[in-house]
Image: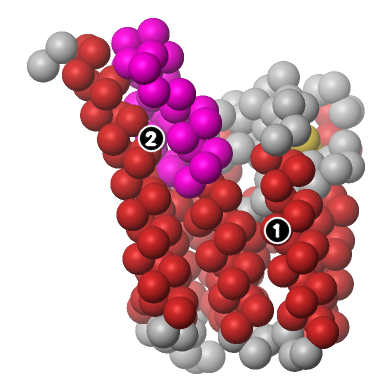
Amino acid sequence: MTVQNKALLVHLLTATGAVFAMLAMLAAVDQNWSMMFVWLVVAFFVDGIDGPLARRYDTKNNAPIFDGVLLDLIIDYLTYVFVPAYALFKSGLLPGWTGWIAIIIITFASAMYFADSRMKTKDYSFSGFPGCWNMLVLVLFALQPNFWVILALVGVLAAAMFLPVRFVHPVRTQRWRNVTLPMALAWTCFAGWAAWVDFHPASWAHFGLLVTSVYLLGAGAAQQIIYGKDG
């Protein structure tokens, strides 16, 4: 198989994320939250491996007819933002007006962030919260905190999208990658586990989700504090 065909296959792999987004949305419409999150976790896994494959086979030069960056952003908006926002709204975790406030904030702020040309830093971290609402909403389904806590988290993270706070990319940020990458893989496993057992409150997956989420949210800011904002 030629390298051009391999590069094309990477684009096709990325595009499967759209299919998984649709399957997740169909499950969400039926309020089958566990199945919805299973599909979102599958999409999250695909999103984690297609980037390294795209760089390995240089899709930009070997399959230039498709814009891999644009394709990835479209699918990320569906799986990271749109479907999770719908699930948060319909789940009952945010009653009444709070649900409307949350979905307006999430979808609007994320649309602006995804179009922001400054979202990546020199070390390939994200500048600002990278709109990973799929991760937040899954943790909220598992822990089910008070709706005021949820609304506060949505507000803080939406504001953090446009603040000079760094968030690590599990694959591309080299600093602490030997810890960050296993943490991201562990988060994926815990997320799949939690969804598979229908977010049973006695599941150890919830503890794993909490620990890995705190690390992934705070690692970039910790690096800024330790090494300086330009470090």
Assess disc 2: are there few (<14), some (14-19) or many (≥20) residues with their C-alpha within 10 Å of its C-alpha: many
Q: Tell me the number on the disc at residue 107.
A: 1
Q: Quadrant of the N terminus?
A: top left
In this view of the protein, which residue sits in the foreground, 219 or 24? 24
Give the extent of the magenta segment: 47-75
Reply yes or no: does residue 72 show up in magenta.
yes
According to the picture, the residue beneath numbered tag 2 turns out to be 50
Reply yes or no: does residue 105 show up in magenta.
no
The image shows residue 221 at horizontal and vertical percentages of 81, 43
Q: How is the image coloured?
A: secondary structure
Q: Quadrant of residue 231?
A: top right
Q: Is residue 202 left or right of residue 63?
A: right
**Dot 2: what SS?**
helix
Amino acid residing under circle 2: Asp
Amino acid residing under circle 1: Thr
In this view of the protein, which residue sits in the foreground, 35 or 144? 35
Q: Quadrant of residue 85?
A: bottom right
Taking the image as drawn, is residue 38 in sight?
yes
Q: Earlier in the sequence, mark 2 or mark 1?
A: 2
The image shows residue 151 at horizontal and vertical percentages of 82, 75
Q: Tell me the number on the disc at residue 21.
A: none
Assess disc 1: are there few (<14), some (14-19) or many (≥20) residues with their C-alpha within 10 Å of its C-alpha: some
In this view of the protein, which residue sits in the foreground, 210 or 33? 33
The image shows residue 32 at horizontal and vertical percentages of 41, 83
Vertical order, 180 against 104 (above or below): above
